[in-house]
Image (cartoon, grey):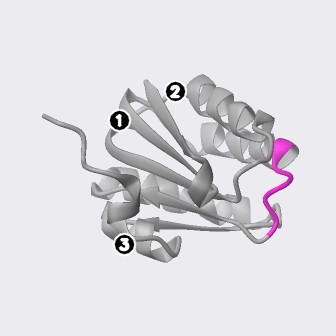
Amino acid sequence: MINRKVYSELSLVVHEVVGELSADDFREAGVALYELDPVPPFSLWDLTHASVAEYDIDKIRRLQHEVAGIAKGREGGRTAVVAPTDLTFGIVRQYLALIESAQLPFEHNVFRTKAEAVSWLGLEMDSLGPPPAG
């Protein structure tokens, strides 16, 4: 499941993934992002509670082609991905290496912690509000 929160005042969309991140869910979240008006230039994907064990290089390549096909309107933006586990971090790195060839109009990077990702986006953790209860 992907929980999405739009911070219009920060030009940011945060996607928090809980459980299995399917290719269909990822694709749908990407399409929904580009349907926003205006499209926020900054995006944060938090995979702290996600499972990506079902991904292989072929799925990653298909996703790369699909994202490259819809990516527009985010010139000068940034996408940060939080991937604290070794497996998730490695899969995200593969995806980002492939997406580099698409020459998207925004930067992307992967981080081990949300604080690092938020800082790279040029924001403060406090600007995202209190952490969820639990």
Bounds of the magenta span?
70-75
Where residue 40 sits in the image (x, y, percent)?
70, 52
Q: Amino acid type of disc 1?
A: Ser
Q: Amino acid type of disc 3?
A: Glu
Say above or below: 35 vs 129. above
In this rendered view, identify the residue nearer to me: 126 or 71.
Answer: 126
Residue topped by disc 3: 116
Q: Tell whether 56 sits left or right of 20.
A: right
Residue 100, located in which quarter of the rendered image? bottom right
Q: Are marks 2 and 3 in contact (CB under 8 Å)?
A: no
Q: Tell whether 120 sits left or right of 51.
A: right
Measured in 3D between alpha carbons, the distance from the residue under mark 2 to the one under mark 1, in whole angstroms, is 9 Å
Where residue 49 sits in the image (x, y, percent)?
29, 39
Which class describes the residues within 10 Å of circle 1: few (<14), some (14-19), or many (20+)? Answer: some
Q: Amino acid type of disc 2?
A: Ser
Q: Name the mark on residue 124.
A: none
Tell me which label, 2 or 3, sits earlier in the chain. 2
Q: Name the mark on residue 51.
A: 1
Measured in 3D between alpha carbons, the distance from the residue under mark 3 to the one under mark 1, in whole angstroms, is 21 Å
> Does the image show residue 52?
no
Helix, strand or loop status at disc 2: loop
Residue topped by disc 2: 22
Q: Does the magenta stretch include residue 57?
A: no
Say above or below: 122 vs 45. below
- Secondary structure mostly seen in the magenta stretch: loop
Q: Does the magenta stretch include residue 74?
A: yes
Residue 58, located in which quarter of the rendered image? top right
Say above or below: 1 vs 35. above
Tell me which label, 3 or 1, sits earlier in the chain. 1
